Image: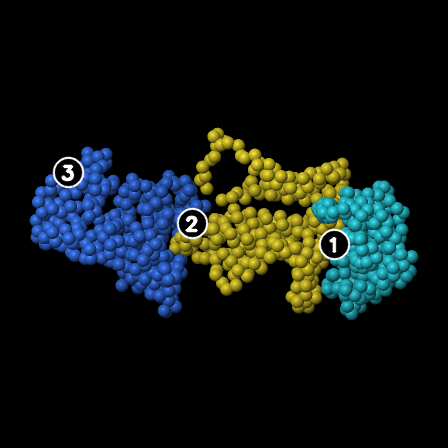
Chain colours: A blue, B cyan, C yellow
Amino acid sequence: MSGLEARVHVERSAQFRLDVELTIPEGRTVALLGPNGAGKSTAVATLAGLTPLQAGHIKLDGRVLDDPAAARFVPPEERQIGVVFQDYVLFPHLTVAENVAFGLRSGGSTRAEVKSEVVRWLDRFGLGDLAVARPPDLSGGQAQQVALARALITEPKMLLLDEPLAALDVTTRAQLRHELIDHLEGFSGPRLLITHDPTEAFLLADEIYIIEGGRITQVGSADDIRIRPRTSYIADLAGSNLLVGSAAAGIVMVEGFELLVGDTHISGPVLATVHPRAISVHRRHPEGSPRNTWQTEILRIEHYGDRVRLRTGDPLPLTAEVTPVAAEALALSAGSKVWISVKATEIGVEAD
Amino acid sequence: MSGRVASALLAGVLSACSPGGASAEVLVSAAASLTDVFAEIEDAFETANPAVDVILNVAGSATLREQITAGAPADVFASADLRNITVLSEDGAIKSGITVFATNQLEIAVPPGNPAGVSGLADFERTDLLVGLCAPGVPCGDFARSALQLAGVTPAPDTNEPNVRALLTKIAAGELDAGIVYTTDVVAAANGVDGVMIPASHNVTAQYPVATLIDSPNPEGAAAFVAFVLSPSGRSILAEHGFGVP
Amino acid sequence: MDRPTVTKRGVSGPPLVIVLLAAVGLAVFVVPLFGLLVQTPWGGLARLLSSDVVLDAIRLSLVSSIAATVISAVVGVPLAWLLARVDFPGRALVRGLVLLPLVLPPVVGGAALLFALGRRGVVGEPLYEMTGLVLPFSTWGVILAATFVSMPFLVITVEGALNSLDRRYEGAAASLGAKRGAVLRRITLPLIRPSLVAGLVLAWARALGEFGATITFAGNLQGRTQTLPLAVFVALESDRDTAIALSLLMVVISLTVLVVLRSRWWRPS
């Protein structure tokens, strides 16, 4: 089949062991989401060919890149996998144009071909004015664009992005996230996004692999992961509600629904996050402060361990979490009519 | 330069460290070719004078002269040639009269078994052999050149070694086919070389003078040591090592 | 690369104790030089330095120190690369062996070279029988002795630079299709250039000043094996003025090269 099929097994010590399976079809973006130290960077290194597998295999478009059992190992320079490294790893002694040209020069293109291609790609990324700048003089956003151009210009068969937005400040991050979505859509091969940021994974990936302690603990869409988190890490970090809307004067409009938020200064397109445990569930209209209060119906209810997750219906579908004791006291079940309330200050807002 | 400074510093430290030092120590600066024989004379002298500690400072004669000029403390100077001691005498650094206490002759040193079949001074002209001399300015080098001149030989040395020990090392290792050294160096079995005699008509006699110094910290000790070198005991030790005793 | 500039304003002077100790430290270097300058026979300097002995020694010193530096670069950089990049058995021992000449008295090194590569040495004897080549008492012997004592400076500097280089630069280059040789040439070497240049300069300076191993292994013959340090040593026994003039010349050559290189290419990264 075309796309990536991999089982990555690397064991460094009793403490560190990475054993994950990944399948990424052509034209799809998979996010590998997990905390620091989960083994994400090692996974990048094995796929790129910088660290050999100890067991398992890596196949790209049907070609075996690494298979210790068959004693097959394709070195990184022959893998045709474009990599955007964490912190971008631009060559500091080369100009922006030379960085972007690097892959083509290695591929044996003529000087003239390289030159015209580089000009084309620099323009495409709006980097034309920075052609002779050196990496240390670039902003984080510019460096990311150069790294992306450098990887894409060689027309790789797969794209690996290791924390492409982590090094950026908040405002640049929102802008570049949109641009990144465009670039990913323009790339036809499989794409793997390594990130520790659930928002990034939800917005950029078609499918999310959660990695914890070197193992995949859950695979699914953003919705799957939100409603049925399989571990407490997933529940805590990846299980948040992510709402896309626009803000003005302390109010965020999400598909026609008004949410009051704590941040009264932000305006324009925003991402709002609401943690499931920040949502209160009541049988009757609650008294007191929360002004974000509405009535809805419970669509689904999932019990697992010491938590109960609820999926609520219109006007604003959300995932909420309550304790089993509360669920019992409120006699919650699918179809129950409930009141939902969220404090304005519990809603995180950032520019989109 | 730095060697001289270091030696001067070291000598200073040594004398500063010994409590009541002057009467108990005799500082003897002796030419490198006297290393072995003076070590034995030191032992014999100390046995005869248990209260006295002889400290030997061994180096090339010119180096020793430089040290003394630079103010390094010394009681006795035993040189391998007359030139260096005469220079000191002209500087007014010598106290007593200069006495020649030993003589030495030259000999051709070859590796054990004489693999290149060296037979005389004429072989020092041959370019197919590897031959070495002491450098000009070093007593053994100057003597060797005088001998070669007497034999009418223009030498083609492959190296001019800074002192006779360095020359002997390379001959003993077989890296040089021949070199001109002192008879005493061939006699000393520890050097591991064989000798080829130089005819008396071409040979040169090196004279070893000894003198006490004007700035001697221990004049009595100095005089006693020189007297011992010139005594029958001293002379017999010198003779055992192959030196001529006048 | 992009360092904040420290302005003089608002920074109080350095502590007196440090200044005093630093001055003593500096004196260790400056006082001997001063001694040399005081003794220099300035009037006859031009005549002393234009003698055959001196000109031959200058030529031989430059040729042998540069040759030793080139050889060190050609074989020392790969050695440093292996030490830094390949985890082979006995690596610690190899590293120790490479650094040994740094602590070994050069005379011992020269003697070891003589026993190994001399005409009767374990390697030198078969070499001599096969090729007729005799390393002692030849300019090649001088170059070999200089390489022996100077290469560790290059290896230690380059290995240190390779160890502290972010390996991901090389990984990024490989992922962009660059073969290992190209990665080394286009990424690794340019990135460690400041250390490489520093290592080359240190190695050259050490080769230029080499004495003990040279005189022990290669001997001393004007025009063939007598480098500047050997000429100084021999002249000290016989011709003090020439010795001092030569010493001064070595100081000037070394200082000029070190200062010029330091300001031009050898900037700390």
Q: Write the residue at 74% across / 61% down.
A: B169
Q: Name which residue type carries label 3.
A: Ser
Residue ID for mark 1: C221
Residue ID for mark 2: A111
Image quadrant assignment for residue A249: top left
Q: Write the residue at 28% across / 53% down.
A: A33
> Label 1 to label 3, Cα distance in Å?
101 Å
Q: Name which residue type carries label 2.
A: Arg
- Secondary element under disc 3, as helix, strand or loop, is loop
Tell me, for residue A289, which label it has, or none: 3
Chain letter belonging to callout 2: A
Do discs 1 and 3 share a chain? Answer: no
Q: Write the residue at 16% across / 43% down.
A: A342
Circles 1 and 3, Cβ within 8 Å, touching? The answer is no
Q: Is residue A3 left or right of residue B211?
A: left
Q: Position of residue A220 (x, y in %)?
A: 22, 56
Q: Position of residue A332 (x, y in %)?
A: 10, 52
On the question of residue A153 being in view, the answer is no
